[in-house]
Amino acid sequence: MMKKIKPISLPKLSNGTHYAFHYEMLERLNGDAKVKSKVADELKAYEKAFKEEERLLALSRKSFLTDEIKEADSVRDNAYTLFRNAVKTFVKIPEEKMRSAGQRLWQALKDYNIDVRAPFYKQTGLMTKLLKELESKYKAEVEELNLGSLVEIMRGSNDTLRKAIYKRNDEKSEKLPGAAKAARKEVDDAYKAVVERINALVVVERTTEYNPCIDGMNGLIDYQRKQPADAKEKTPDTDPANGTGGTGGEEIPDPVAPTPTPGDGGTTGGPTGGATGGGEDELPDPLA
């Protein structure tokens, strides 16, 4: 079955989300040799426009990279939460092969003990090491449980966050909001040219050879569509790169960090924050 790349409204994305979205799209396009060879000219223009947006982000006094850091952190934390909850579910299923894979991955998560509320630098370092193992030592387990897409999202957002924090620390004070806005439009136009070219090739060549790349791109588009509308920051003085982490009130409940119990400073137990039932089926939480 021939497929096409879905549409998405790019102007509505915040600067951080916009950067992360195109970063991931370029990663996917460059990672598919067949598609890359067919859209070489369009891809070259896309990369050139994206590099200019990246340069201007680093020059912004407001630091659009602050938005980028928050967006990447939110994407990474959400993906990690989904991955962790999925692994915990597989640990309990009857099918032995999948259960064994889930148990090995769960042990890895316990070993790394990642807390999404930890300082950015600590979480990013631990996540980098975990991802290396998920893509090598535990690659078979990830594939067995079909969790590769979540690992890709974690890797992409973790890399984006790591690079953004580094750039933000060295950014210059020159303010170029108008130029940055124009650069965004250039990137969007270049992206649309790539999409139109690929969709046209599908029709003309009547082939399914581009489906893997299209599936990956559509997966990212679907993921972005499901995210809440970007909102203005209510606490602009908060600097996430200084080490507190988190994305504010919009962040989903952390399934990893213990939740204090009123009055005694204890925890409520399980990763979803519910009370500990004490049953034999309850899995131990890495941070409990």
Image: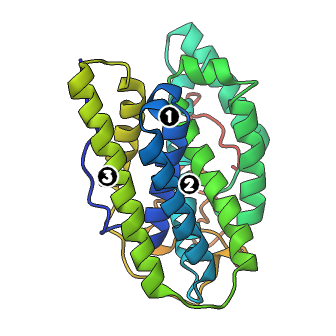
Q: Position of residue 250 (x, y in %)?
A: 42, 69
Q: Which amino acid does label 1 sit on?
A: Ser
| Disc 2 and disc 3 in contact, CB within 8 angstroms | no
Mark 1 / mark 3, whichever is N-terminal = 1
What secondary structure is marked by label 3? Answer: helix
Q: Which residue lies furthest to the left in this view?
A: 203
Say which element carries label 2.
helix
3D distance between C-alphas at marks 2 and 1: 14 Å
The residue that disc 3 covers is 192
Q: Name the residue under label 1.
A: 149
Residue 224 in the image: above or below residue 182: above
Which residue occupies 66% across, 69% down?
264
Which color mode does the image show?
rainbow
Q: Is residue 251 above or below residue 286?
A: below
Q: Looking at the image, which residue is at 37% across and 31% down?
A: 215
Q: Which amino acid does label 2 sit on?
A: Asp
